[in-house]
Image: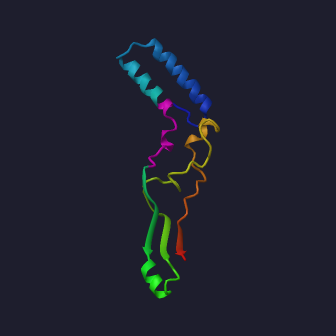
Amino acid sequence: MRNVASQGDNFKASEDLKALLATQTPDTDAYRATATELAKYANYRGNYIESNDFIRLSNLTISYDLGTWAARQTGGVLKRCVISVTGNNLWLNTSYKGAEPQIDSQGGSSRTRGIGSLSYDWTAVPAPKTFALNLNIGF
């Protein structure tokens, strides 16, 4: 039986299975059984892996040019007047169970952190929804 609580025990067991597999004849029941058991050790973290496919509306801006109207209302003082509303991170569709499918909470790259931390998602913070109202005026 596999011990998934200890990486060291898993490593020793998988090395033992590799050695046993090398002594067995391919295409036999014993060979297939050993190979199947070895595959379980190779994927002992598989229960932590899930798809993080997602579709996101990251940014949406709606603008309206009030230039002609503003020029008439101000007697030509305003040459340009554009009003716009911008929203960020307005919509996210995902089956990912974590807080944020796009953030690796450990930061950095695989060269700067331990390989063991690649699958951790403990404290990822979701991207905030933000809104902005902009007024662009030209004289």
Expressed as whole percent of the image width and height from the top left, the position of residue 38 reads 47, 26
- Horizontal side of 104 relative to 29 (left or right) equals right
Q: Residue at x 55, y 36 (%)?
A: 4
Q: Residue at x 61, y 53 (%)?
A: 123
Quadrant for residue 120, please give it: top right
Task: Determine the residue located farthest toward the left in the rendered image.
Answer: 27
Expressed as whole percent of the image width and height from the top left, the position of residue 53 reads 43, 49
- Horizontal side of 29 relative to 9 (left or right) equals left
Q: Please give the count of numbered marks on the rendered protein.
A: 0
Above-or-below relation of 15 to 78: above
Above-or-below relation of 19 to 5: above
Q: Residue at x 58, y 54 (%)?
A: 124
For the magenta stretch, what is the residue range?
Answer: 40-52
Q: Is residue 117 visible?
A: yes
Question: Does 48 lie within the magenta span?
Answer: yes
Q: Nearer the viewer, residue 12 or 123?
A: 123
Q: Residue at x 46, y 17 (%)?
A: 21
Q: Nearer the viewer, residue 32 or 131?
A: 131
Quadrant for residue 125, please give it: bottom right
Expressed as whole percent of the image width and height from the top left, the position of residue 57 reads 44, 60
Question: Does 57 lie within the magenta span?
Answer: no
Quadrant (top left/top right/bottom left/bottom right) for the C terminus: bottom right
Expressed as whole percent of the image width and height from the top left, the position of residue 94 reads 43, 55
